[in-house]
Image: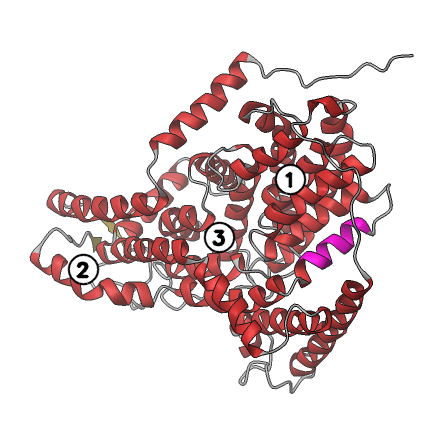
Amino acid sequence: MSIKTTQPAPASGWFNRFLSTVEFLGNLLPHPITLFALFCLFIVVFSGIADWFGLSAIDPRPIGAVGRDPDGIIEVVSLLSAEGLQKIVTGLVTNFTNFAPLGTVLVALLGVSVAEHSGLLSAALRGMVMGASKRLVTFMIVFAAILSNTASELGYVVLIPLAAMIFHSLGRHPLAGLAAAFAGVSGGYSANLLLGTIDPLLAGITTPAAQIIDPSYQVGAEANWYFMMISTFLIAILGTVITEKIVEPRLGKYNEEEASEVLSASVEGLSALERKGLMYAGLTFLGLVILLALTIIPADGILRHPDTGLVKGSPFLKGIVAFIFVTFAIPGFVYGKVVGTMKNDVDVINAMSKSMGSLSMYIVLVFFAAQFVAFFKWTNLGTILAINGAQLLQTLSMTGPEVFILFILMCAVINLTLGSSSAQWAATAPIFVPMLMLIGYAPETIQAAYRIGDSVTNLITPMMSYFGLILAVATKYKKDMGIGTLIATMLPYSMAFLVGWIALFYLWVFALGLPVGPGAAIYFQP
């Protein structure tokens, strides 16, 4: 009795044209760093033109509010002038050094780098996936892939190839395993049970955007923690269902002749030493959590707010990046000490140095992004566009929660051609955060909505930085694998994540009225 092998159906004509359009538009865009440099130049020139035409807006803030012009009129400040040139030249360095995301990301990554280079994160993820029962293996792969976002490239480099190997060893289609892991790592990029480097990065961009309307507003790294924790389980469940009910049946039974090389069907588990290291690292982490809890749970906890005694606005939340550093670095070193990957302080320093070296591109990007954000603030263009945009939404009666559907869809479309999360948010936050604040929504809620749109289309854009790596892994199992086939495989995840995540957002925020993070407001009260 022969078993019929089902091959992936070719993408339809319209879908091929859609993919070709995405690739074409993406290839037209310059490098994100060049893009921000061009944005800066555009702001300088446009501010001069807008000033000449007298572009302005009525300040909606009450009389006497901090930063409000006495006349109540916000006018464009031209940078295309002698004064503007002086401001640019004198502010070039401070714009960069005062850019909030830079310091917070660097500090958080120092701790994560120790856990990553010691092998702790890799062993923990492998242990989760390989220790799962056959019935739960798909769920655990997607779940572990989401958690791998704590250390940016770990999921792409380690977990995605491992997932394909595990599915192959179980007699399942390896590309289904690859797709499940890719869905968790990339499509669930913003979701996590833990705070990672992306949280302080986005919060650092949201804060100055919010300060366009309220100069005292602060957005912490924990701003979306609650919502992203519950999102982790949603994405894990959706990823599991899509893999087992749609993707795997569509791929059919795997044919070994499709592989481009001879592949091993066995996967090595954790060694006894690695298990011992994980146990000691886990106990260390638990000890740190208990110690930290003693500083915030008691009513007189030393990390509570000194005046109100509350956790909201406390040193604990303001210093959350320091705790990310500690809770990754110390268990990471303990694990490394047990398994032998780290012996002394030199190994820790080397691990931190390697991670800092890998951030060279990010630091260059931040330099130009910081100038763009500063120029936008100096010229008042962000404020004027936000006020006029908010007035347009009010005129169209689009001030209800439904406005977030359009906002999320817009972010998802932009993400198709501008794959960097920080680059996209740095470019759009100065406009949309104050705009949506003016119609009554808190920056934390706006940022959570952005993170949905920024994640769900990562799976289907060739502009995503690791897309080429995923395709290379896929061709090991299917030698004629192309970009269109990979995107067609991932499209069901992208669609399900978009619909499911938007539904969760509305249920969590507007139906149940739950905050997206500790102390985070849903609505903005001037």
Identify the residue under disc 2: 88
Q: Which residue occupies 47% across, 38% down?
A: 415
Amino acid type shown at disc 3: Tyr
- Picture disc at residue 262: none
Dot 3 surroundings within 10 Å: few (below 14), some, or many (20 or more)? many
Asked whether 123 falls inside the magenta stretch, the response is: yes
x and y, in percent, of residue 457 in the image: 54, 36
Q: Select label 3 or label 2 by which is in front.
A: 2
Is 180 located above or below residue 370 in the figure? above
Asked whether 185 falls inside the magenta stretch, the response is: no
Identify the residue under disc 1: 183
Identify the residue under disc 3: 441
| Badge 3 element | loop
Q: How far apart, in angstroms, are the residues tagged by discs 3 and 1?
A: 30 Å
In which quarter of the view is residue 34 placed? Answer: top left
Q: In this view of the protein, which residue sits in the foreground, 249 or 316?
A: 249
In which quarter of the view is residue 255 placed? Answer: top right
Amino acid type shown at disc 2: Ile
